[in-house]
Image (cartoon, rainbow, N blue to C red):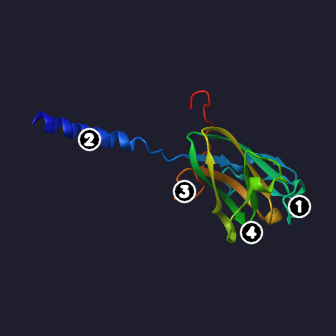
Amino acid sequence: MIAKLSKGILTALGIFSASSVFAADRFVWIEAETGAEYNPIVVKSDPGASQKIYLASWAWPDYTTRNAGAGKISYSVYIPEAGTYKIWARMRSPSGTRPYDISQDNSNLADNAAWTRWSATPALTTWGWSDSGYTGTFTAGTHTIYLAQREGGPNVQLDKLLITNNTTYVPTGNGDAEVTPNIANP
C-alpha cells in the first residue's frame, strides 16, 4: 500500500515539475513614442491613440529602398525570458502597406541579412493591430528593435508595439500599459 501511495505521489510530483518547464506567456508592451525616432519620423497627437500620441512621418521620402532619409525608430526592450517572440503593432495604414523593415540588435541599414520586411498590412483606416510577420529568437536581457519605414509615408501612424512569446495571441483594443521593468531585479 505504501509503495502504491509513494508511486502515486511521485507521479503527481513528476507531472507538476514537468509543467514548470514550460515558459510563461510574456507580453512586452511598448508605446511607440518611447522609441528614439529619426527624421522624418515625429510625434503627433490623436485622441484615439493609446496615450493620445503616436509616431508618423511628415514627409514622403524615397521608400524604394531602406534608407536613413525614410526614417527609423529604435526601441530598447527588456526581454524577461529567452525564447521565440513575435512582434505586433497598433497602427493606422489607410492604403494598406508593408510599412516597416524590422531588425533585432543591428541598426546597419545596408545589411540586408539583418532586416525582415513587415508582412503586408491590410488597409487600417482606424486604429488596429498589424501582424508584422516577424518572429525572432531572443535571449533574456536588453535588446534593441529597429523599424525602418518603407511604405506609406505620413499615412502610416504607429501607436504601440507588442512583443510576445505567445505566437498565437492576437492583441485587441489599446493593449496593456507599457511597464518599465526593474532590470536589477526583474
Distance of mark 3 from mark 1, alpha carbons? 34 Å
Across and down, in percent, residue 104 comes to 71, 48
Q: Residue at x 67, y 49 (%)?
A: 51
* Contact check, label 4 and label 3, Cβ < 8 Å: no
42 up-or-down from 133: above or below: above
Tell which circle, 3 or 1, labels the residue nearer the N-terminal end: 1
Q: Which residue is mark 4?
A: 97
Considering the numbered disc 4 on the image, is that residue within a helix, a strand or a loop? loop
Across and down, in percent, residue 83 comes to 56, 46
Question: What amino acid is labelled 3 in the image?
Answer: Thr
Q: Residue at x 53, y 46 (%)?
A: 26
115 up-or-down from 153: above or below: above
The foreground one among 55 and 135 is 135
The image quadrant of residue 131 is bottom right
Assess disc 3: are there few (<14), some (14-19) or many (≥20) residues with their C-alpha within 10 Å of its C-alpha: few
Considering the numbered disc 1 on the image, is that residue within a helix, a strand or a loop? loop
Assess disc 1: are there few (<14), some (14-19) or many (≥20) residues with their C-alpha within 10 Å of its C-alpha: some
Q: Which residue is mark 3?
A: 167
Q: Which residue is mark 1?
A: 59
Tell which circle, 4 or 3, labels the residue nearer the N-terminal end: 4
Tell which circle, 1 or 2, labels the residue nearer the N-terminal end: 2
Q: Is residue 135 left or right of residue 61?
A: left
Q: Nearer the viewer, mark 4 or mark 2?
A: 2
Q: Which residue is mark 2?
A: 12
Q: Is residue 96 left or right of residue 154?
A: left
Considering the numbered disc 2 on the image, is that residue within a helix, a strand or a loop? helix
Across and down, in percent, residue 59 comes to 88, 61
Distance of mark 1 from mark 4, alpha carbons? 16 Å
Q: Nearer the viewer, mark 1 or mark 2?
A: 2
Considering the numbered disc 3 on the image, is that residue within a helix, a strand or a loop? loop
